[in-house]
Image (cartoon, coloured by chain):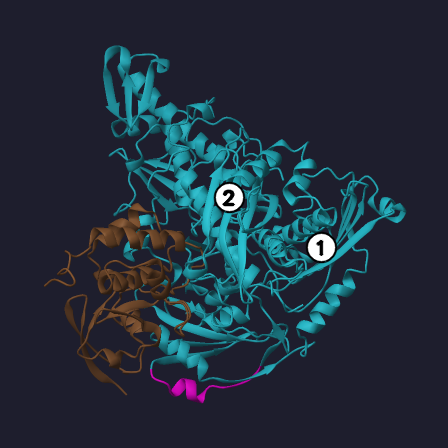
Chain colours: A cyan, B brown
Amino acid sequence: MTVRNVSRRAVLLGLGGLVLVPVVTCWPEPPPSDGPTFGWTADGAPSGHMFGVFLRVATDGSITVRLPSTEMGQGIVTSLPMLVAEELGIAWKQVRVEPAPTHAAYRRWTPIGAMQVTGSSLSIRSFFEPMRQAGAAARTLLIQAAADRWGVPTAACTVASGIVHHAESSRSLPIGELVEAAAELPVPDDVPLKPPSEFRLVGTDPRRLDTEAKCTGAAVFGIDVHRPGMRYASLRQAPFGGAVAAVDDAAARAASGVLDVLVFEDFVAVVAESTWQALRGVELLDITWDAGDDSTLDDAAIRERIVAALDEPGRTHHVHGDALDALADAETVVEAAYFVPYLDQAGMEPLCCTAEVRDDRVELWAPTQTQTETQKYAARASGRSKDDVHVHTTFVGGGFGRRVEWDFTTQAVRVAMQVDGPVQLVWSRPEVFGHGFYRPAVGGRLRAAIDEQGYPRALSVRVAGTNLARHYLPRLLQGVPPAEKVMVEGFDTYPYRTEHRHIAFRHVGLPVPTGFMRSAGFGHNAFFRECFLDELAHRADLDPVDYRLAMLAESPRSHRLLARVAELASWDAPAGRFLGVALQESYDSIVAMIASVRLQGRAIVVDDVYATVDCGIAIHPDNVRYQVEGGIAFGLCSTLHTQINIANKRVVQTNFHQYPLVRMSQMPRVHIELLSSDSPPGGVGEIGVSPVAPAVANALFAATGERLRELPLRPGLA
Amino acid sequence: MVQTIQFTLNGQTRTVRLDPETPLLWVLRDALGLRGTKFGCGAGHCGACTVRLDGAAVRSCVLPVGAVQGKSVQSIEGVEHPITRVWTEDEVPQCGYCQSGQIMAALALIEANPAPSDADIDAAMQNLCRCGTYNRIRRAIRRTATLVEPSDPEPQGAP
C-alpha cells in the first residue's frame, strides 16, 4: 500500500499536501495550542516560536513537538519527536511533546480519505518525511540566524546538542538565543534531509517520553480528566438495531448523588455527582427495550449465513493468471475451510469522554484515535460548526482500533447538551463488551491446484463476513471495491510463487457492528493462508519451512526472514519441541514467526515464540521489538481463549471472566530479531499479531496431528 | 446512608463521610482526587484498581470503603521505593493503564517475599495487561528484588 508523501512546502504551510501553493516568505499562523494534557510536559503557557505546525522552539532551547498521532502504547510519542530532534540537531533531554489540536494541518492520507486519525500502523509512514522536514527547516533557519549574526557562510555552521557552531572561528550560540531572529527569516526554499546513514538518534533507544509518568500514576488518560464543576455520567444502550421503548427511572432518581436521567432513542444515561453513583444509577433503571429485527440471532445463525456466503462468488479483488480455469482442469485439488469468531478489542480503559457544551464552544477531552471524526460528529450532534468544536487528545488505555469510533464521544456531547458545565461519560465494562465494533466473524475457503511436487500452482480464496470498513464510508461508496480491500488484505501481499491466484470477498450483512481491531484483515487472512500452506506442505510430506522457502525465491526479504527465524528457533533440531511457522507481510513490514507449543491435558502451552522482523528503518529498535512482543501477547488471546458469542442478538460476554486475556503465567518467552533493510520504514504497531494464530495452530498440528481450522483453538474437541 | 470512615492513606490520616458501600477505588479517584488507581472492569477481574491494604494487594473496585476503617492503604501515589526507578529504567509500560495496579501488586509481592521465584511471580501477578508487558514486569520484579533483598537470616541448623 503506498502512502502519499506530503510535499515539503505544503507541510510548512500546514496544508497537508492537498494543493500546490506559491512560495510565501513568512510562517503561517499555526493552529493555537490547546496546552499540554499529558500531565507531565513543561508547565506554564507555551513560549517561543512555532516553526511550521509541528515544532515550537523556546528561548531556553527546549523544543516542543506537536504530536499528530494519539499515543496508545505504540510508542509514537517518542519516535515521532525523534525524527524532529534528529534533523534539528538537539539533545534528547531538550525535547518536550504535546498533543496536536484537531486541525486540518495534522491530517494524514488513509485508505478512506485524509483524516487526523491514528490507526493502520500509519504514524511513522505518514510523518517520517514531514517530521524530518520540520526539524530540518528549523535547523536551516537557526543556522541562518547565527550565520547572519556572525557574518559567516551558513555552510560553515553546524548544530549539535542544541548549539550552533562555527568551527573556524570557534564561535557558538545556543539555539534559544537564535529563536527570535530565526522566526523572522523567510521560509527556506530547499531543505536537505540527512541521509539515513548519518542518523545519530534514529536507530537508538532513548528513554521514552511517557515512561516515567506511566510508572508513577501521573499520566492522564481519558478517564482521569477532571474539569472544575464536572459531573459524571454512565449509560445503558439499546440492543443492536433496537431502541429504548420505556424507562422507569424512579429508583435511579431516588439514589444518592443522582442528578438526572436522560432518555435518548438509543441509550439512557444517568448524570450524578460521582462515577460510582452514575454507574450504580444506570443499574437501577428499569428499561424496556425494543429489540428490533432479527432478535433471535445467535452464533449458529451467523455461522450459517457466513458459510452460505462462501458458496457465492462475491466480488473479485485480485486476479493473477487464471486460477479458476487452472483449478477446473487440475488433477489434484485440495480444499479447506476456516472460521474465526467476533472479537472485542478489550483495551483496559473503558470507553469514556469528557465534554462541555457552552454558548461559544464545544470542548471534548477524549482518549480518541480519531480527532477528525470525533470533531465532525460532535459538531453535528451539537448543531455547531466544526471550528467551534475543540478536541483534546489524552493518553489512551489501549486503542486497538476501538477508539477509532465516535459513538462514545458523540454520546458525551449529547449528554453534555443537557447538563450545565462539563460532564464525563464513563461506560461500564459490560457496556464495552456488549456494544462494540467487533473484529467480524469471518469464514475462508481456500482451494489449491497442486503440481507434481506438491506446490500450489493455482490458488482460489473466498472470504466472507461483514465488511468491517463499511460504516466508515458514506452509503454512496459502500458497494465500491476499494472499501472491501481490508477484508482480503494478507492475500494481496502474497510473496510465494503461485502462478494463478483469485481472491474474492462476499460481504454478509449482519446487525452486529464491526470495525477495526489490531491487525484488521491480516488477522483472519494470515490464519487462513498460513494454515492452508502448512496443510499443503504436510500433504506433500515436505518440511513447512523448506516448502515456503522454495516458493520465496522471488521474495528475498521474506526468504531471508524465514531462513533466519528457522535458525533462531533451531527448527532443524526441535529436540522434542513442537514447532509451527507462519510468515506475513502487513503494513509494509514483514514478520516471520515460529511458535513452540505443548499440550497440558487439553490446554495449549506456548513456551517460546521466535520472530524475525523487517520494518525497514527502525526508528526506536527497542520499541519495535516491544511492539512485536505485545502483538504476540495480543494475538495469543484470540488464538487460545477469547471470542465474542451472540445469543438473542446480544453479546454473551459481560466482563473479563468470560473473555480471558492471556496472563503472566501464560506468556511465552519471546525472541525477536530485527533484520534491517534499506526499505523506508514500515508500520510496527500491529505486525506481531497476525502470524501468531497460524504459527500456534501449525505447531499444534506438529504436536498432535490434529488440524484445527477455527479459533480459538480447542484441541481434542473436533 | 453515610458513615465517617478514618483510615491512613499513603502515610496520612484521611477522613471521609460517605456511603460505606462505596468502593475504595471511587473514594480514591473521585472523593480524594487521586487518579493513579484505575477503573478497568468494576468486578475484580482485571486488577487495574489494585492498591495495598495493610500491605496486602487488594482490588479496590470491589472493596467497600467501610472495610478500611482504621487500616492503612497505599496507592500508587504513595510509592517511594526503588521499584519505580526499575520500572522506568526497564521501560515496562506501553499504554500504561494497567501499570499502577501492576506496580502495587508487585510491591506487595516483593515486601512479603523478597526473593520471589517465577512460580511466586506467576501466582501473585494475576493483573491483566492487554498490551502484553508481562515479560518486562517479571524482569522488573526480579531486578527490584535484587535491590531490596534483606540481610541474610540466621543460618539454619546452627547449634
Which of the chains bears the disc numbered 1?
A
Which of the pair A140/A377 is nearer the observer? Answer: A140
* Image disc number at residue A476: 1
Secondary structure beneath disc 2?
loop
Q: Are marks 2 and 1 in contact (CB under 8 Å)?
A: no
Circle 1: residue type: Leu
Q: Give the residues in magenta.
A: A245-256
User: Residue A492 at x, y = what percent?
Assistant: 69, 43
Relative to residue A661, is residue A266 depicted above or below? below
Residue lying at the far front of the rendered structure: B159
Q: Residue at x 46, y 54 (%)?
A: A668
Residue A410 lies in the magenta stretch: no
Q: Residue at x 29, y 48 (%)?
A: B88
Q: Residues within 10 Å of mark 1 (few under 14, many from 20)?
A: few
Residue A255 lies in the magenta stretch: yes
Circle 2: residue type: Val
Relative to residue B133, is residue A322 depicted above or below? above
Q: Quadrant of residue A649?
A: bottom right
Secondary structure beneath disc 1?
helix
* Image disc number at residue A684: 2
Which of the chains bears the disc numbered 2?
A
In the image, which is nearer the foreground, mark 2 or mark 1? 2
